[in-house]
Image (cartoon, rainbow, N blue to C red):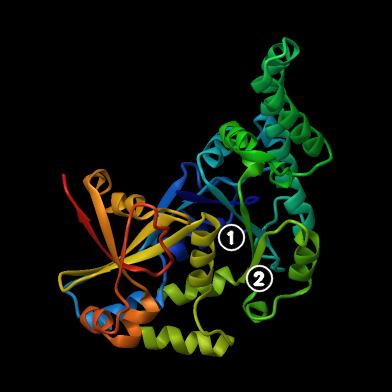
Amino acid sequence: MKAGIVGLPNVGKSTLFNCLSNAKAQSANFPFCTIEPNIGVVNVPDPRINKLEELVKPERVQMATVDIVDIAGLVKGASKGEGLGNQFLGNIRECNAIIHVLRCFDNDNIVHVDGNVNPIRDKETIDIELQLKDLETVEKRLEKVNRAAKTGNKEAQTEKGLLDRIRESLLQAKSARTVVPQGNDEEVLMESFQLITAKPVLYVCNVDENSAVNGNKYVDQVRELVKDEDAEVIILSVGAEADITELESYEERQVFLEDMGLTEPGASVLIRAAYKLLKQQTYFTAGVKEVRAWTINIGATAPQAAGVIHTDFEKGFIRAEVISYEDYVQYGSEAKAKEAGKFKVEGKEYVVKDGDVMHFRFNV
């Protein structure tokens, strides 16, 4: 599962990517600096794994990760191939969620591709290009399905009905994610269309250092604009975050954050939000060899969770032994949680909860 960072050129995408991944993607004050999409595998900050490490004292710790993709800046006309349009749109189609960076700071030394700072216009520029590309996809698909629908084919009629609704929304400059699938058949179809504007989105307002806590007039404008989108808005001073990553010690970083009025780096908040946006959650395995956070989809069953460790675990699944994270911490160890009756044995139908500490029994 991958979240792609998008935005106009020079809004801070590559600098943000560097902060998140320390992969040092090329970052410069000119458009199209990121040509190939850079992929960073980023640890998901989670204080729970630190607590488990403290209790278990394992030989090693493995955190959950999320893949972040830094994609080339998009410009007006991208849907027709302007700039790196076709490449950009191909790269974003392969992502599962979108982190949309908007420039919300004034700085005469950093050029804006459209001449002045206006996050509302910037957002609309990108939305329109993505919507135009989706409209092209929908209309091509409609050409094929219309003929089958006229013959009375029920499946084709269902598909045509959904495509017509999506097309209508796109023509009104609304993204495909505003169309709610009716029933399981439409949900499966919506997934199969692979529409860019159907992907969940998170907005990052890149502000100056002084606006990192409370935002500014630009952030207020963005919040007002997206209030009906069911999308989270995060305030981040990307320049300050870059400075924080350059500091050597944890103590120095904490002093820097305190001076800014923050309790943790904004990058940590963003990574957790991206993880949630991808509909991911965590379960833990805790033993003296290793304490590890495993990533699963929200709603995964115990056998599916076991399969993340090894496919054989899922194929030969017998049962899962489960202690909730809260019980594990309250009693201080697996043995004491068992003594207190907080140890559960679950079967194939069990839906894993975020934070479960698990062992699997299997037979292959």
Label of residue 244 in the image: none
State the separation of the CA atoms marked 2 and 1: 10 Å
Observer-nearest of 349 and 62: 349
Asked if residue 218 is positioned above or below residue 114 in the image, the reply reads below
Across and down, in percent, residue 284 comes to 32, 67
Left or right of 315 on screen, residue 224: right
Asked if residue 45 is positioned above or below residue 259 in the image, the reply reads above
Q: In terms of secondary structure, where does tag 2 sit?
A: loop
Left or right of 155 on screen, residue 68: left
Residue found at the far right of this picture = 172
Observer-nearest of 212 and 227: 227
Q: Quadrant of the C terminus?
A: top left
Amino acid type shown at disc 1: Gly
Across and down, in percent, residue 24 comes to 41, 59
- Asked which quadrant contains residue 254, the reply is bottom left
Label of residue 207 in the image: 2
Amino acid type shown at disc 2: Val
Q: In terms of secondary structure, where does tag 1 sit?
A: loop
Across and down, in percent, residue 317 comes to 25, 50
Q: What residue is at 61 percent from the left and 51 percent from the top? A: 200
Is residue 41 among what the camera can see? no
